[in-house]
Amino acid sequence: MPDTPVLWTSEQIEAATGGRLSGAPFEVTGLTYNSREIVAGDLFLALKGARDGHEFAASAFAAGAAGALTDHGVEGGPSIVTNDTLKALEALGVAARDRAVRRGAVTGSVGKTSVTQAIKAGLDLAGSSHGSIKSYNNHIGVPLTLARMPQGTARAVFEIGMNAPGEIAPLSRMVAPHAACVTTVGPVHIEAFADGEAGVAAEKASIFEGLLPGGAAVLNGDVAQAAVLEAAARAQGAQVLRFGTGAAHEARLIGFEPDTEGATVRAELHGKALEYRLAQSGHHWGLNSLCVILMLEALDVPLETALPALAGFAPLAGRGQTMQVAAPGGVFTLIDESYNANPLSMTAGFRSLGVRPVGQGGRRVVVLTDMLELGDQSRALHQGLATAIEAAGLDMVHAAGPEMKALYDSLASSRRGLWRETAAELAAEAMVLAGPGDVVMVKGSNGSKASLVARALAALAEGPGGAI
């Protein structure tokens, strides 16, 4: 196995952060702030959170850390001592920024992580690339991802998120992207915004503030706040590229036909007809895929590379992964959407489930847990899901959580399955949530533990390899 290339030398870290070396010079091949994730050769970042990372420096060195980034001296190994470890990490990220010739940034109320990873799949096919892992999209995740970028990277993509106003623009300026996109805008994190969805739109639009001169702004032209997004992009002098169903959009969705293997998309790209395959069957992937294509185009990845990347991009864990579960009573299909949820993604999920084929005697079943961070609109937004469930023609709804009780009580009695106070209680009754031939979607906010139900349903598989 070839040696891992050097990512940073202690001299380079000193120069980037303005820190001073304590101990012998060193070289690192990776970075992490979690002492439990250290691999030999890493730089340990002693950040301060619920616990002070400096307390774990000794264990990081014992695990093989080559050096540490700190704001005071530590024992066990060499370190670069700075005034503020987080600010030093930001400076290291900025110093690494230009290692990528072309950079993209992604935000949106729904679909940030999946769209980011789909773009990364295209960048991978086009050459040396780098990008966010998991949902590393906040004030720590963005500079960390930048600082992890190897020398000689051709293209990179970064996910940028927010929980409160004023968070996206500084992170976008840190990335300084050549192209940035907003996947969609909806009532997510609205408890942090006095003006609700309008405030969310303005915050999402602020990603364009970091664009380099002449950069591309890719935006969803179908959302109610599209004009806000476009105005923000044009204020930065960006090249505006819209995706949606409108005839004037640069990427226009014409048709989306899901099947058991994924979906076929019919579209127009800059006025020219286009048809391609996806490994994703969720209806929202019609627009998501157009966003990906426009972003890849702006990052100098040709269409003949973008389309195979999309065709091979499988759903991420908790974001649409599908499996056949050979349970004692018979086989059912499980769609795991348990990572996160909000009114937009719920509605899209119901629509996708409503057109999925079921087995003989099977039903279309949703298992839902609470959507979080909806503020004083929470009850109304949960109740409002009943209309989307009815429109999709779903057969059965199981639910958990006090907020989902509002939805449960709004459903026709024929659609009501089980309701329990917590996801753990519902997971304990997994055996009665699904039957032979059913297609079962599990969806809810990460904090309301929808994943407990998804894991319990998958665990119904009989014996090794029961989930296929």
Image: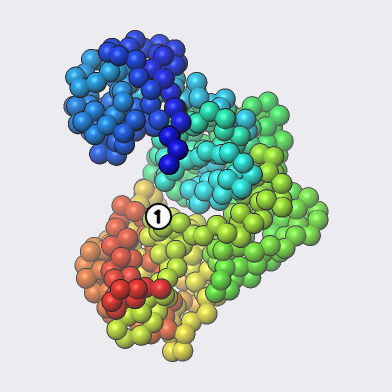
Secondary structure category for the residue under label 1: loop
Badge 1: few (under 14), some or many (20 or more) residues near its Cα, within 10 Å? many
The single residue placed furthest to the right in the displayed view is 271
Quarter assignment of residue 98:
top right
| 134 lies left or right of 52 | right
Q: Residue at x 64, y 27 (%)?
A: 212
- Residue 42, x across and y down, in percent: 34, 30
**What residue sits right under mark 1 in the picture?**
340
Look at label 1 and name its amino acid: Asn
| 249 lies left or right of 463 | right
Image quadrant occupied by the C terminus: bottom left
Q: Can the viewer see residue 367?
A: yes
- Where 255 falls versus 32 (above or below)? below
Q: Please name whichever residue, 239 or 120, is drawn nearer the observer in this view of the structure.
A: 120
Q: Can the viewer see residue 226?
A: no
Q: Residue at x 37, y 76 (%)?
A: 325
Q: Please name whichever residue, 178 or 64, is drawn nearer the observer in this view of the structure.
A: 64
| 62 lies left or right of 155 | left
Quarter assignment of residue 429:
bottom left
The single residue placed furthest to the bottom in the displayed view is 361
- Where 143 falls versus 158 (above or below)? above
| 265 lies left or right of 141 | right
- Residue 398, x across and y down, in percent: 33, 72
The single residue placed furthest to the front in the displayed view is 1
